[in-house]
Each structure stands twice: as C-alpha cells, then as structure tokens.
Image (tube, rainbow, N blue to C red):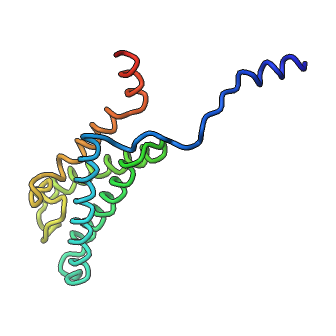
Amino acid sequence: MAQREQASSEHVATTSATDTRRPAYGVGRVLILVYGIFAVAASARASVQLLRDAGEAPVAYSLSALAGAIYIVATIALAHNGRRMRRVAWVAVVVELLGVLIVGTLSFVAPELFPHDTVWSRYGGGYGFVPAVLPVLGIGWLWYSSPARVVARAERG
C-alpha cells in the first residue's frame, strides 16, 4: 500500500496558478484596441443620447448603450487568456454579431422601430460598417488564438 501511495505521488506534476502568457499579440492587440475605441464611442454616444434626449428614441438609445456594454465586455474578455474570459469573449462577440444582424435587418425592414440610429443600425453604416466587421474579426481571432490550435501549430512546426 505504501508503495502505491509513493508511486502515485511521484507522478503528480504541479504547475503555477499564474498564467504567464501574454494576453494578446500582433493582430490581437489591434483588435483589442479597436474594440476599446468602439466601447468608448458607443458608450459615450449612448450616455449623451440617454441623458439629453431619452424620450425621443428610448429603444434606439438603449440599444446603443447595450452595444457599448457589449463592446466593453468584449474588450476586457479578449484581452485575457483565461478559459472563463475566452468563454465570455465568445458570448460577447456572438451576441454582438446577432445584434448587428438583427438590428441591421430591422432598420431596413421596419425603419419605424428605429427613428434614430443605433450603433448597429443599417449594419453599422454610421460607423463605416465596422460594427458588422468587428464581430467577424473577433470570432476569427478567438478561433485562431485558441490554446489548442496554438499548441497544435507549435507542434507541427
């Protein structure tokens, strides 16, 4: 019995609980920067609109505030390597893509729902369509930078 316990304890490997990997590099840092800019832009715009003219278009301005909050969450989550934060990033980026697609489509099909533009109106046309492209880039980055894929690429070559 003592031999089994000794043998099993010899094979236990311990690692540090601290993640020493860099949060992002190259394209990932640029993506995080753009998300951060959109987080500030959408949140600031929505805050001003809600404080000044909330009664004019509460749905549109609230959707802009929601977009700003999603951009903030996505920015923070994309900047981290942890498993939980990657899941949060996936959820934020997918919700963002769904928001752009749904609000963008509704802004064309039923424009009366959005008498004033949101960040996602007309698929982000007011922002140079960056809101439509950004979640696609975010999904691509999350897929490409997956720890399993990084390890597989490192082992191949």
- Tell me: 139 left or right of 133: right
- Tell me: 13 left or right of 35: right
Question: Observer-nearest residue: 139 or 29?
Answer: 29
Question: Observer-nearest residue: 118 or 15?
Answer: 15
Instruction: Please provide percent x and percent y for residue 56.
Output: 18, 80
Q: Residue at x 48, y 45 (%)?
A: 84
Q: Is residue 140 above or below residue 103?
A: above
Q: Is residue 78 above or below residue 151?
A: below
- Tell me: 26 left or right of 16: left
Q: Quadrant of the N terminus?
A: top right
- Tell me: 133 left or right of 89: left
Q: Residue at x 25, y 65 (%)?
A: 40
Using the rendered view, name the quadrant where residue 16 is placed: top right
Question: Observer-nearest residue: 157 or 138?
Answer: 157
Using the rendered view, name the quadrant where residue 12 is placed: top right
Q: How many marks?
A: 0
Q: Residue at x 38, y 22 (%)?
A: 154
Q: Residue at x 33, y 60 (%)?
A: 72
Q: Quadrant of the C terminus?
A: top left
Instruction: Please provide percent x and percent y for residue 78.
Output: 36, 48
Instruction: Please provide percent x and percent y for residue 80.
Output: 41, 47
